[in-house]
Image (spheres, rainbow, N blue to C red):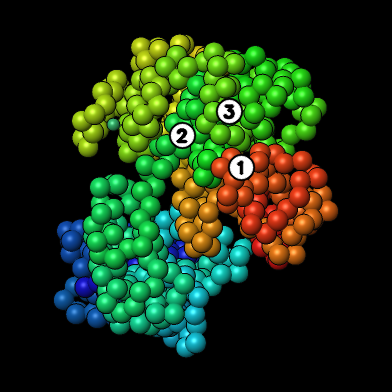
């Protein structure tokens, strides 16, 4: 049954689909001719021979004559009638017995046979292949990961039990596909999982557990899975997964950190040991409009400003960089440094107010994160979240102005737009920016291609599900300990290579060689890392560099720093 459905599906794709339209048109034309002939038959019989026939009998006569069956039970007995019967027979032969079979063969049968002969889904990964990534389950996250794997030259194979998908991926997208169910040991052996770098199980929790158990019965290759429900993580780990990524939970935390506007400590994105990395909006602080040198942030708090964001673009600042109202600073420092900033600006997390539109899994995780800070927030969703008993949301369609006003859009300082509908997210961004021009808007893009539109609609920061998911997967695959700031920027660690022992940051030419910037130096026996070391800081082999740069710059570090 499945095979028949798969074969039938062939006729709904590409050229075959076009041809199907031609066939439908042709059949409509045939039907029109039959009906026309039937009425003519009725008319001629009455006028020439005075006999009356029903429309059913007329259609019966036309079909038997057109198909050359001619039972002979109804016949004309006059020359004009014979002429009409000849016309019907000849058009039947041409349209029904020649053109129709010819069209069926050339438009459908021949291309279908050709396709069957030409396409043989790959049945296995070539012998000797190793270090490849096996991907089970394609979605926007794994598709973005594939683009990264291609850019890094890492081989990968996609396992799919769907013949149609296998053809589409292999033929139309040029990917390497293995056709078969990845929860079967035989298929996993064909994928050579035992020599693979890792297996990514992304088919939903039940299928993933099946895959993991079968992989584990064969080998101990690394297995990474993505989960929607954080509580499923334990089952996947029990089955044998090495890494379980609760993506929606991470995304919620991500959005929440970026939507808060007050309380420097609430903005911490991540940490490297004692070193915290935070993103702080300049809006509302005493630094608005000042040059970085004049803001004296380093002198007053000890924090180093290592980057500045302006509506989706990142730059490494210098002394003359102006801190505009919509700038977001990326700062590095210790907890004490951030507390010093909080004292300086007099802002407290409790004085913030964040509006969250969308109380799905991501919105819920953002709210939980804000609870822990504690930053006050208001949740809005058009439906109650059946999986959450902790939060109370305002229920209503957020496209309505009264709902937004009821949710205190004019008093909120930050807004998280996180519905699963990008069209609605763009609308909310535009509408809320109009209602409250200074609000900090952090939006979720469910599809990568909507990131630019969300920025254009007025979002201060856009988080793309696919891109965050793919970055996390890539970091695990490459065994990297790095913090993903946003598409294009990350903070990562690199040990000082032996060749640089005794050199200074300037003479080691790290910036020239790799393009990335050293933001801190860690020394194993030293408790406090040195933040923003000066170019004459001397390097030694027991130190670790903490750098900021793009993934390409990071790759250059691995290439150039030995
Ligand atoms: P999730 O993908 O799990 O984060 O769920 C997305 C949430 O967005 C769901 O709870 C939806 O009810 C919610 N949502 C979708 N469209 C709207 C809308 N127009 N107004 C309010 N909430 C929405
Ligand atoms: Zn909740």
Asked if 207 appears above or below 445 in the picture, the reply is below
For discs 2 and 1, the disc positioned in front in the rendered view: 1
Tag of residue 175:
none
Q: CA distance from mark 2 to mark 3?
A: 23 Å
Q: Circle 1 sits in a helix, a strand or a loop, which is it?
A: loop
- Name the quadrant of the C terminus: bottom right
> Ligand 2 is in which quadrant of the figure?
top left
* Residue 122 x, y percent position in the rendering: 43, 81
Asked if 128 appears above or below 398 in the picture, the reply is below
In the rendered structure, the answer to whether residue 523 lies left or right of residue 159 reads right
Q: Is residue 97 visible?
A: no
Query: Residue tagged by mark 1?
Result: 529
Query: Residue tagged by mark 3?
Result: 337
* Residue 335 x, y percent position in the rendering: 52, 31
Query: Residue tagged by mark 2?
Result: 255
480 and 233: which one is in front?
Answer: 480
Circle 1 Cα neighbour tier, 10 Å, few/some/many (<14 / 14–19 / ≥20) = many
In the rendered structure, the answer to whether residue 538 lies left or right of residue 373 reads right
Q: CA distance from mark 1 to mark 3?
A: 12 Å
Asked if 486 appears above or below 557 in the picture, the reply is above
Q: Which residue is drawn at the image coordinates 57% and 60% (left, top)?
A: 148
Do callouts 2 and 1 mark residues in contact (Cβ within 8 Å)?
no
* Residue 107 x, y percent position in the rendering: 45, 74
Q: Which residue is drawn at the image coordinates 46% and 11% (left, top)?
A: 410
């Amino acid at each position: 049954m499945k095979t028949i459905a798969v074969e039938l599906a062939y006729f709904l794709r590409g050229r075959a689909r076009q041809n199907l339209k031609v066939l439908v048109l042709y059949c409509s034309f045939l039907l029109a001719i039959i009906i026309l002939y039937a009425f003519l038959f009725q008319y001629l019989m009455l006028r020439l021979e005075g006999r009356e026939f029903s429309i059913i009998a007329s259609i019966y006569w036309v079909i038997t004559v057109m198909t050359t069956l001619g039972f002979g039970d109804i016949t004309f007995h006059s020359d004009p009638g014979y002429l009409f019967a000849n016309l019907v027979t000849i058009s039947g032969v041409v349209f029904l017995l020649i053109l129709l079979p010819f069209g069926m063969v050339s438009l459908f049968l021949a291309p279908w046979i050709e396709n069957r002969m030409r396409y043989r889904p790959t049945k296995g990964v070539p012998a000797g292949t190793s270090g490849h990534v096996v991907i089970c389950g394609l979605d926007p996250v794994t598709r973005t990961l594939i683009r990264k794997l291609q850019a890094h030259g890492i081989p990968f194979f996609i396992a799919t039990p769907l013949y149609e998908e296998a053809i589409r991926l292999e033929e139309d997208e040029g990917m390497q596909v293995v056709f078969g169910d990845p929860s079967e040991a035989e298929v996993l052996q064909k994928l050579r999982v035992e020599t693979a770098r890792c297996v990514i199980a992304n088919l939903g929790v039940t299928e993933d557990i099946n895959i993991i158990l079968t992989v584990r019965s064969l080998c101990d290759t690394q297995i990474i899975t993505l989960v929607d429900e954080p509580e499923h993580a334990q089952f996947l780990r029990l089955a044998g997964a090495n890494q379980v990524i609760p993506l929606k939970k991470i995304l919620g935390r991500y959005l929440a950190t970026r939507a808060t506007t007050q309380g420097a400590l609430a903005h911490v994105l991540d940490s490297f040991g004692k070193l915290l990395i935070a993103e702080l909006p300049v809006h509302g602080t005493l630094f608005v409009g000042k040059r970085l040198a004049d803001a004296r942030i380093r002198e007053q708090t000890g924090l180093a400003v290592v980057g500045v964001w302006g509506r989706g673009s990142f730059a490494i600042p210098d002394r003359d960089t102006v801190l505009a109202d919509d700038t977001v600073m990326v700062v590095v420092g210790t907890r004490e440094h951030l507390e010093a900033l909080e004292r300086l600006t007099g802002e407290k997390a409790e004085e913030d107010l964040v509006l969250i539109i969308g109380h799905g899994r991501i919105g819920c995780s953002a709210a939980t994160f804000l609870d822990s800070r504690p930053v006050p927030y208001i949740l809005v969703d058009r439906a109650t979240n059946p999986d959450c008993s902790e939060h109370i949301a305002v229920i209503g369609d957020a496209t309505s102005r009264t709902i937004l006003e009821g949710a205190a859009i004019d008093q909120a300082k930050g807004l998280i737009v996180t519905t699963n509908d990008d069209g609605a997210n763009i609308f909310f961004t535009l509408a809320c920016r109009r209602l409250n021009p200074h609000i900090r808007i952090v939006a979720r893009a469910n599809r990568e291609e909507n990131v630019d539109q969300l920025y254009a609609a007025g979002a201060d920061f856009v988080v793309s599900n696919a891109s965050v998911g793919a970055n996390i997967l890539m970091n695990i695959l490459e065994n990297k300990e790095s913090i993903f700031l946003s598409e294009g920027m990350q903070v990562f660690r690199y040990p000082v290579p032996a060749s640089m022992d005794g050199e200074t940051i300037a003479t080691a030419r790290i910036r020239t060689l790799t393009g990335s910037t050293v933001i801190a130096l860690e020394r194993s026996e030293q408790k406090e890392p040195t933040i923003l070391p000066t170019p004459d800081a001397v390097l030694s082999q027991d130190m670790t560099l903490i750098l900021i740069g793009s993934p390409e710059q990071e790759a250059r570090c691995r290439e150039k720093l030995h």
